[in-house]
Image (cartoon, rainbow, N blue to C red):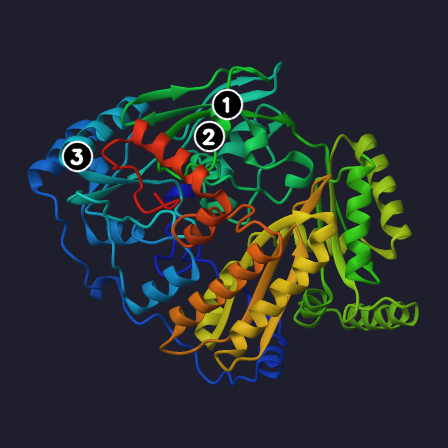
C-alpha cells in the first residue's frame, strides 16, 4: 500500500492504526502531573464522529462538478463529507482543537485529484473562469494553516487540488546524480524508488511518512539530516510550476546567473503563485552506513559551541541535535525502561558514575550525532566530530542511544493527540539565528513561552534543541507543555504564539525556519519581509495570478 493510501486521522496525526505506546513509559503521566500541577483522571476523546459532523454543503453546482470531472475523470473528483473534511484542515494545534470539537469552518467545496500536469492546467483555467479559489494539497501536514481552504475576494467557492496521483519518478540520471519526479510523490515512495537504483535523497522531516515533494518545496521544508544535506531549496535543481498564466520551468543546470533565481522564488511560495508539478532533485549514493550515536555534554552551551566549531572547521555530520537540560531530563525520566532487570540496574549504575564525573541529564545536554555515507569515510568523520565534542565537554554514550532515537524518529507527533486527551497543551515552534545570538534568543523565547502559559494559570515545561545547523548559525526548536485551558484552548494557543512571535522578532530570530508561513505566521512574516518586499511579492502574484485564485489568505496575500 502506498503511504498516500493509508487512512489517517482527520482529527489528529497519522495512521489511524498506530499510536504512541505510552503504556511502555510508566513515568510519563506521573512526571507531567508533578511538573504541570495537573491531574490526569480522565481521557478527553474527540467529541464528534465523522458521521455526526455538520459541515456546510458544497456551494458549487453539479454542472461545475461535472466540468471538473471531465478533466480528471469522475472517480477523481469528490464532494463527499469524508474527503472534504480530510482536506479542510492541516495539523496545527488550532486545527486539531477545531477538528476535535467538530468545527470545520472552511471545507473545500470539492476535492480534485489530477493525474497529469495537463489536467492541472485545465483545472486552473476552469477555476479562474468560474471564480473558484484553489488550495494545493500534498499530504496536508502543514502546521501553519497552509492547506486550509479560504475564500479570496470575489470568489464563490474553493477546490482542493490533491496531487497524490502525480507520484511518478520520471527520470533518474545516475551520472549527474539527479532525479526528476512528479510533485505528488510522498516521502517513503520517493526513497523506495531511489533505493532501487542505489540512490538516496535524504530529506526526512518529522512528517516524512505523510508528506510529499511538492509540499516540501512549497513550504521550504527541512529534514532531520539537513545539517549535512541542506534544506529542500539546496536539494532543488529545477522545477515546473503551473500558474493561471502559464507554466514556469527552470533549467536543469547546476548553477546559473540568468537573473533572480526562480527556483528560490517558487520555493516557499506555498501555493500562492501556482501548483508545483515536477522537480529535479539532487540525490546521492545510498549510504553504506547510518551511524547514529548518543552523547552527553556537561552544558547546553558546550554543545552549541561544539556544533559551531565542527561546521566552521569543515567536519559536517548529517544530523546533530543538541537538547537543553530541560529536554534532556524529560527524555531520561519518561524513557522506556529495560524489560531486563539486570540491564536496567546497569543503566542506573552508569548514570550514577556519570554524575560523579559531572555529567547529568538534569544539568547537561543530550545529543544525537548522525553520520551517513561510505563506511570508511563515515568512520573517519565520526571520529573527528566526536573529538570536537569531547573538547567541549561531551562524553560518548554509544550507538544504542543514537539508534533508539533514529528508529523512533517518526513516532513523536502521535503524542500530541494523546496529551490533548489528558488535558495537556503541547506544541512546537522554531526559529533560527546567528551563532552570536543563539543563547540570547534561546532565553528570550523560553521566557516568553513560560510567561504566556502562566497568563493562563499554567505551569510549564519548555524544552529546546538545536536541530538544523550551518556555518553561520543554527535553528532553535522549542517544544512546550502546559495545562490546557479547557474551553479556551485556541485563545490560549494564540496568546502563546503572539508572545513567542514577538520575542523572536524582537531578539533577532526569523519567524520560521522550516514550518512555513501559511496564515498563522503571516503577521510576523509581513514585518520580517518588509513593506517593499511585500509590495514586490504582491506584484509577482498579480502577474501570475491576477484573479487571486491561488491559495488566498496565505503569505499575507
Q: Quadrant of the C terminus?
A: top left
What residue is drawn where x is 69% and y is 37%?
A: 228
Q: Which residue is mark 2?
A: 265
- Sequence order check, earlier mark of 2 and 1: 1
Q: Quadrant of residue 255?
A: top right
Q: Are marks 2 and 1 in contact (CB under 8 Å)?
A: yes
Q: Which residue is mark 3?
A: 74
Q: Quadrant of residue 99?
A: bottom left
Q: Is residue 273 visible?
A: no
- Is residue 269 rendered to the left or right of residue 77? right
What residue is drawn where x is 70% and y is 59%?
A: 440
Question: Callout 3: helix, strand or loop?
Answer: helix
Front disc: 3 or 2: 2
Q: Are marks 1 and 3 in contact (CB under 8 Å)?
A: no
Looking at the image, which is closer to me, 387 or 209? Answer: 387
- In the rendering, at what x and y percent does residue 213 appear? 46, 35
- Is residue 118 rendered to the left or right of residue 305? left
Q: Which residue is mark 1?
A: 260
What residue is drawn where x is 27% and y is 49%?
A: 150
- In the rendering, at what x and y percent does residue 463 appear? 64, 65
- Is residue 413 rendered to the left or right of residue 93? right
* CA distance separating discs 2 and 1: 8 Å
Q: Are marks 3 and 2 in contact (CB under 8 Å)?
A: no
Amino acid at each position: 500500500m502506498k503511504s498516500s493510501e493509508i487512512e489517517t486521522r482527520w482529527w489528529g496525526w497519522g495512521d489511524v492504526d498506530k499510536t504512541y505506546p505510552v503504556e511502555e513509559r510508566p513515568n510519563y503521566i506521573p512526571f507531567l502531573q508533578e511538573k504541570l500541577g495537573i491531574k490526569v483522571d480522565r481521557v478527553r476523546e474527540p467529541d464528534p464522529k465523522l458521521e455526526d459532523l455538520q459541515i456546510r454543503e458544497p456551494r458549487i453546482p453539479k454542472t461545475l462538478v461535472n466540468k471538473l470531472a471531465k478533466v480528471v475523470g469522475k472517480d477523481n473528483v469528490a464532494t463527499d463529507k469524508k474527503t472534504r473534511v480530510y482536506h479542510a484542515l492541516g495539523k496545527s494545534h488550532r486545527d486539531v482543537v477545531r477538528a476535535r470539537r467538530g468545527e470545520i469552518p472552511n471545507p473545500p467545496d470539492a476535492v480534485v485529484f489530477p493525474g497529469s500536469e495537463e489536467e492541472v492546467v485545465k483545472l486552473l483555467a476552469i477555476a479562474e473562469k468560474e471564480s473558484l479559489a484553489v488550495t494545493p494539497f500534498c499530504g496536508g501536514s502543514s502546521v501553519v494553516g497552509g492547506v486550509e481552504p479560504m475564500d479570496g475576494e470575489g470568489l464563490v467557492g474553493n477546490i482542493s487540488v490533491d496531487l497524490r496521483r502525480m507520484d511518478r519518478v520520471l527520470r533518474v540520471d545516475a551520472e549527474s546524480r539527479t532525479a526528476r519526479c512528479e510533485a505528488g510523490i510522498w516521502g517513503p515512495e520517493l526513497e523506495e524508488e531511489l533505493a532501487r537504483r542505489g540512490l538516496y535523497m535524504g530529506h526526512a522531516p518529522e512528517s516524512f511518512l505523510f508528506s510529499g515533494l511538492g509540499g516540501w518545496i512549497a513550504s521550504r521544508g527541512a529534514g532531520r539530516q539537513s545539517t549535512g544535506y541542506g534544506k529542500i531549496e539546496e536539494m532543488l535543481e529545477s522545477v515546473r510550476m503551473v500558474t493561471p498564466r502559464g507554466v514556469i520551468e527552470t533549467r536543469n543546470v547546476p548553477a546559473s546567473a540568468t537573473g533572480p533565481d526562480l527556483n528560490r522564488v517558487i520555493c516557499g511560495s506555498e501555493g500562492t503563485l501556482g501548483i508545483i508539478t515536477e522537480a529535479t532533485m539532487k540525490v546521492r549514493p545510498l549510504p553504506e552506513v547510518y551511524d547514529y550515536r548518543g552523547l552527553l555534554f556537561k552544558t547546553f552551551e558546550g554543545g552549541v559551541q561544539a556544533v559551531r566549531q565542527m561546521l566552521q572547521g569543515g567536519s559536517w555530520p548529517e544530523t546533530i541535535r543538541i537538547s537543553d537540560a530541560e529536554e534532556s531530563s524529560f527524555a531520561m525520566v519518561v524513557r522506556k525502561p529495560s524489560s531486563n532487570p539486570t540491564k536496567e540496574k546497569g543503566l542506573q549504575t552508569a548514570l550514577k558514575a556519570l554524575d560523579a564525573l559531572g555529567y547529568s541529564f538534569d544539568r547537561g545536554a543530550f545529543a544525537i550525532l548522525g553520520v551517513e555515507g561510505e563506511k570508511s569515510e563515515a568512520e573517519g568523520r565520526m571520529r573527528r566530530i566526536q573529538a570536537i565534542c569531547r573538547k567541549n565537554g561531551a562524553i560518548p554514550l554509544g550507538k544504542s542511544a543514537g539508534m533508539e532515537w533514529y528508529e523512533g524518529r517518526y513516532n513523536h507527533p502521535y503524542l500530541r493527540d494523546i496529551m490533548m486527551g489528558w488535558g495537556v497543551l503541547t506544541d512546537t515552534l522554531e526559529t533560527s539565528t546567528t551563532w552570536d545570538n543563539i543563547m540570547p534568543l534561546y532565553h528570550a523565547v523560553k521566557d516568553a513561552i513560560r510567561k504566556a502559559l502562566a497568563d493562563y494559570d499554567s505551569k510549564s515545561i519548555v524544552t529546546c534543541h538545536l536541530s538544523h545547523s550551518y556555518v553561520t548559525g543554527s535553528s532553535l526548536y522549542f517544544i512546550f507543555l502546559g495545562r490546557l485551558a479547557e474551553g479556551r484552548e485556541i485563545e490560549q494557543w494564540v496568546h502563546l504564539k503572539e508572545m513567542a512571535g514577538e520575542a523572536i522578532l524582537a531578539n533577532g530570530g526569523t519567524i520560521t525556519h522550516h514550518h512555513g508561513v501559511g496564515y498563522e505566521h503571516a503577521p510576523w512574516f509581513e514585518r520580517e519581509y518588509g513593506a517593499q518586499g511585500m509590495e514586490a511579492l504582491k506584484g509577482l502574484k498579480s502577474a501570475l495570478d491576477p484573479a487571486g485564485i491561488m491559495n488566498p489568505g496565505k503569505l499575507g496575500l
